[in-house]
Amino acid sequence: MIEVLSNSALATIQDGGRHGYYRDGVSRSGAMDGVAVAVGNALLGNDRDAAGIEIPMLPFSVRFDTGLDIALTGADCAAHLDDVALQPDWAIRVHASQVLKLSAPKSGCRAYLCVGGGVDVPTVLGSRSTQLREGFGGHEGRMLQKGDRLAARRTESVLPEGGMGAMPVAALMPELGQGANVTVRVLPAAEYELFRPEAHDALWSGDWAVTPQSNRAGYRLAGPELQLITPIELRSHGVVPGVIQVPPGGQPIIQLADAATMGGYPKIGTVIEADLWRLAQARPGEKLNFQQVSYEDALAARHELDRCLASIEAMAMRVRAAAKGWSR
Amino acid sequence: MISIDDLDRVLGWMLKDQLQALEVSEGNARIRLKMADRPGMPAPRVEAKVLARGLGRFLVAHPRSGEPALKVGDQVVAGGIVGFIQNDAVLLPIVSAHAGQVSEVHVAAGSLLGFGAPVLTLMVEP
Amino acid sequence: MNDHVSLRGEGPQISLLGTTGLVFEAPGAFDLGNQQRIWGMADALGSWAEVREAVPGMTNLTILFEQPPHDFRAFRDRLTSLWASGISKTVAGRTIDLPIVYGGTGGPHLLEVAELTGLSVDEVVSIHSAPVYTVYAVGSHAGYCYLGGLDPRLFVPRRAVPLLSIPAGSLSIAGAQTGVSASAGPSGWHTIGSAEVTFFDPARNPPSLLGPGDSIRFLPEKVVS
């Protein structure tokens, strides 16, 4: 078992998301940084979508009361297992009574703790993700609290002695933009053409600050005002994670994992699926840049990310198998 | 048949028990492995070599840490990671079993490491 | 330039949501006949290999891809043909009665709506509670019902700045729409009353109390002004 030692953590159990209930209004939920969870699961030999713990607010600590394979991915938060520093994007066997401590991140803002076989909580409507608004899924449908105890679905070890890690996905994928800002790729959406030309210029060339009113439901951005040529009222329609809505105030909101499934604000664009994980690690105060892409570019990026994850999975499997041989 | 896995396993035994040579028979197959001679092998407990347990490219530090490479004279703790083996997208740690002071660095950053290749020599504290 | 993003003109409009899905907007009026065509399309799309879910909206349909189509233009053409086929679905739904407290702490924007519409509070309540509303779609949050049938005299624009949270059971209106929140959450609409009702239960099958084609009748229990 894993015992949560931190209070007020905002940590939740998340997997690859709850799919197939959009017509009931159930938002996708799932890990904000799906790539981090996929990498943790790859190192552990889990299914890509197995449930882990999303930790957006640090410091955070847990104690293990059994031997367990764990992986820590996402934000680099100077983690220590007892007194020993743990490498970023790393999987390792922990032992009973060891304490894992995560500190304020050096980069990124969400860390993921994955465990052998995934976190053992009931599947509700096809997923183990926490549905925060409706209060179901995950651990009792809520954020984790001090004293919560969680089990892993597998306790035997598959890892080489000393553990193993993954190359940072950012280093395996093409670099976007330059400088300190976080660049994500955006496909124009339905109402793009209804915005003023100045709004188009501002969208593509502006710096968009992630405001403190940003969470799993969405990021509210601050930047130049985006104005429509003439105001419009839209009929409510489906909205997915990544959609950039522009309310009448002119300051965009990027809808994310826990966003409403339907909305009516004009949509100027959609951050492509392949870049949602980059957004997940952008902190309040950091600035975003949007890079325009075509549908074909977005498809190619999706395939490229998928191939990257598949290659980490395959190589991790080979290394685990070889290491089994060395240790015998 | 003796598979690559079997060879890996045998190599593991040899490294663990510091054997110079080993012969294994299984059915009608037989393999004999012998470690290359290392002239001037130091006396035990004075020097220790840190060996690569895996195949791949030598990284002196984690790609996300930017720490400098270990150099002669640096201190190493027992169980500490002294470098990494990068195999495509996966990293394996190079772990020093002993505490001590680096007396020799055998491989350059980015070079390819074979299984059991010496990475560092340490002067082990008595 | 954005040929694949949007088609504006006489026919349906089809626009991408990245590679996650697309929105199909029916041409024409916001009425039950158009909505029944959306329901019909949603049913038919259930068997398309590229489609994970076809989710009815308000005279529009959001398709979530199982696999995003390689040839988006061909996919768009198939959708347009499906619409042109005139496929439609009528639902013999059930009707529930929902007692409502209009105004007060559960309906803080009732007065504002009266001012915006130029009506008295009593007129707003009687106009709002007169129709039997059809559930056009379920969405936004789990179990929430989008209703058709609001009297045009109550059409008011959305609030300029969305509220961070309104409680479960809040009855609100915006544009040509009205509905009751199934759980607490943010809202850009005007809240004019409140009800006690459980619209969604994940342990129930189906989890939503109402589906497209069902109906709600609002019964004014009390009016607090």
Image (cartoon, coloured by chain):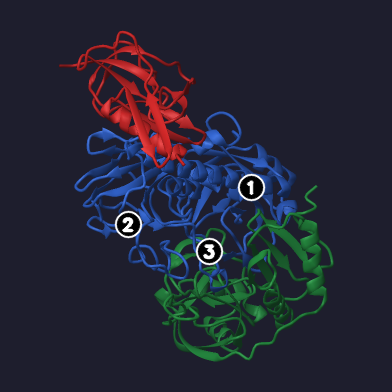
Chain colours: A blue, B red, C green
Q: Amino acid at mark 1?
A: His
State which chain disc 1 sits on. Answer: A
In this rendering, position of residue A31 left or right of residue B40 = right
Residue A79's mark? none
Left or right of A273: which side holds A77?
Answer: left
The answer for how far apart the CA atoms under marks 2 and 1 are is 31 Å
To which chain does the residue with label 3 belong? A
Against C94, is B88 above or below?
above
Is residue A108 in view?
no
Kindly identify which numbered label has been placed on residue A303.
1
Secondary structure of the residue carrying tag 3 is: loop
Q: Please tell me the numbered disc located at residue A152.
A: 2
Mark 2 or mark 3: which is in front? 2
Disc on the earlier residue, 1 or 3? 3
Dividing the image into 4 quarters, which one contains the C terminus of chain C?
bottom left
Name the residue rendered at 58%, 50% in the picture: A252
Residue A240: x and y in percent read 59, 59
Q: Hey, what amino acid is under mark 3? A: Ala
Residue A302, horizontal then vertical, whole percent: 63, 48
Q: Which mark is residue A260?
A: 3
N-terminal of the pair, mark 2 or mark 3, is: 2
Residue nearest the viewer, comparing A150 with C195? A150
